[in-house]
Image (spheres, rainbow, N blue to C red):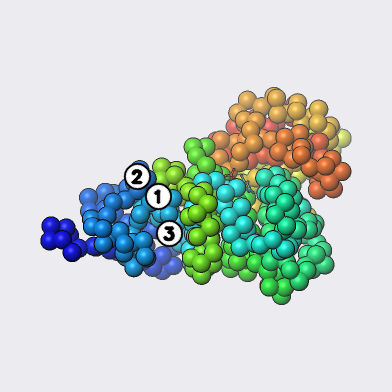
Amino acid sequence: MPENKPTPKPWTPTPYAVTENPQAYGIDTRLVRGGLTRSNQNEMTEALYLTQAFVYDTAEEAVAKFSGDLPGFMYSRYGNPTLDMFEKRLAAVEGAEMCHGTASGMAAVFASMASFLNAGDHVVAARALFGSCFYILNTIFPRWGISVSFVHGPDLAAWQAAMRPNTRAVFLETPANPTLELIDIAAVAKIAHANGAKLVVDNVFATPLLQKPLELGADIVVYSATKHIDGQGRCLGGAVLSDAKFCAETLLPFLRHSGPALSPFNAWMLLKGMETLALRVERAQATALRLATFLQGQSSGGQAKIARVLYPGLDSFPQRELAQRQMSGGGTLVAFELKGGRAAAFGLMNALQVIDISNNLGDSKSIITHPFTTTHRAIDEADRIKMGITDGLVRLSVGLESAEDLERDLAMGLG
Ligand SMILES: *Cc1c(COP(=O)(O)O)cnc(C)c1O
């Protein structure tokens, strides 16, 4: 080794108590301090490492890093200190052994399954899915010789009947978009595992706070961090969480070489988003319950404008027992159906002065959508109706505005 070059030094993050042993701390502490490491400048807030690569002090150090003998960062497609903090924080909140960030929620969904499926494999999935998830399963995977069966999520017998000897993945979203239909995660996990398949759960609607799929038996959890985790409409992001073995041996090589890397800047925003996640979700959820109760009040009597209100926190919710069993709250989304069909739905949406028309969700700004004509328009009309997505259905993502202003906006819109 040349004398004028320092010897290779491993990257040794300063040990912080919450980072070292997050499960010894409450969820709010993990949201604020989980995964924190500081540079030798001892900055208060998480440092933003806007760099594509890292340099080596010596040629020998480069050899040691490439061979894996020396830990540390090499290239931001492989890993980055800001991203590392985001991943450790979300893993600590979820209670997962490992987390990997991705550029978007869809990159997370795709990688969670494409990383381990092979031609000839079979997937069973719930029919009620986010549109792009449905596209991956219904269009991309079959092109690669992976067959997919879709089932009605709440029907456990249908999951059982759809399993085949080559079923390797089971995929579902609960609560599902936009009807908030629930699927019994523990029961589907049992069916999947009896067949040697992995259960992948898209947990976006429940957030990491209101539902714990890994504790209920899921093998992999995916998020669009674009939604509640950022929650302020600033960036896209996603994450896949699972056990260390799957992440290290299967997921990480797939992500490193296919490249859906999360930008360090977006990872930094998501870290900051997590600090207020519980406060935001709790407030939006309290307002969602108030608005759902108000809307339900508009569904009875001769002049009733609303046919039904779907919110897992209402006693009238069709799957209320399951909601109480697997979720710790009703969430921040409310769906309701107007008696007057599309004309009434558009009339309401166009009259709103506070609530925006958009297709995002989990944002600090309240948002309304008409799934039948936008997010779910690609699904065959008969299937849409079967899924409860009628032309009078609207989905409301409840934000952080004053509850009384939102209620007044809806009351005014309903006329
Ligand atoms: C938004 C969303 C996705 C996709 O996330 P992006 O960050 O937009 O790529 C996946 N699943 C669900 C349930 C979503 O709401």
| Disc marking residue 76 | 1
Quarter of the rendering containing residue 303: top right
Distance between mark 2 and mark 1 Cα atoms: 7 Å
Asked if the residue at tag 1 contacts the one at tag 3, i.e. Cβ–Cβ closer than 8 Å, the answer is: no
Residue beneath label 3, please? 88
- In front: mark 3 or mark 1? 1
- The residue at the far left in this view is 3
Q: Residue at x 71, y 46 (%)?
A: 135
Quarter of the rendering containing residue 182: bottom right
Q: Residue at x 41, y 54 (%)?
A: 79
Q: At numbered mark 1, what does the secondary structure look like: helix, strand or loop? A: loop
Q: Position of residue 115 (x, y in %)?
A: 58, 59
Distance between mark 3 and mark 2 Cα atoms: 20 Å
Quadrant of the rendering where the C terminus is positioned = top right
- Which three-letter amino acid code belongs to the residue tagged 1? Ser
- Which three-letter amino acid code belongs to the residue tagged 3? Lys
Q: At numbered mark 2, what does the secondary structure look like: helix, strand or loop? A: loop
Please say if 247 is above or below 379: below
Q: At numbered mark 3, what does the secondary structure look like: helix, strand or loop? A: helix
- Which three-letter amino acid code belongs to the residue tagged 2? Thr
| Disc marking residue 51 | 2
- Which residue occupies the foreground of this view, 125 or 110? 110
Q: Earlier in the sequence, mark 2 or mark 1?
A: 2
Q: Residues within 10 Å of mark 2 (few under 14, many from 20)?
A: few
344 with respect to 131 (left or right):
right
Q: Position of residue 218 (x, y in %)?
A: 62, 66
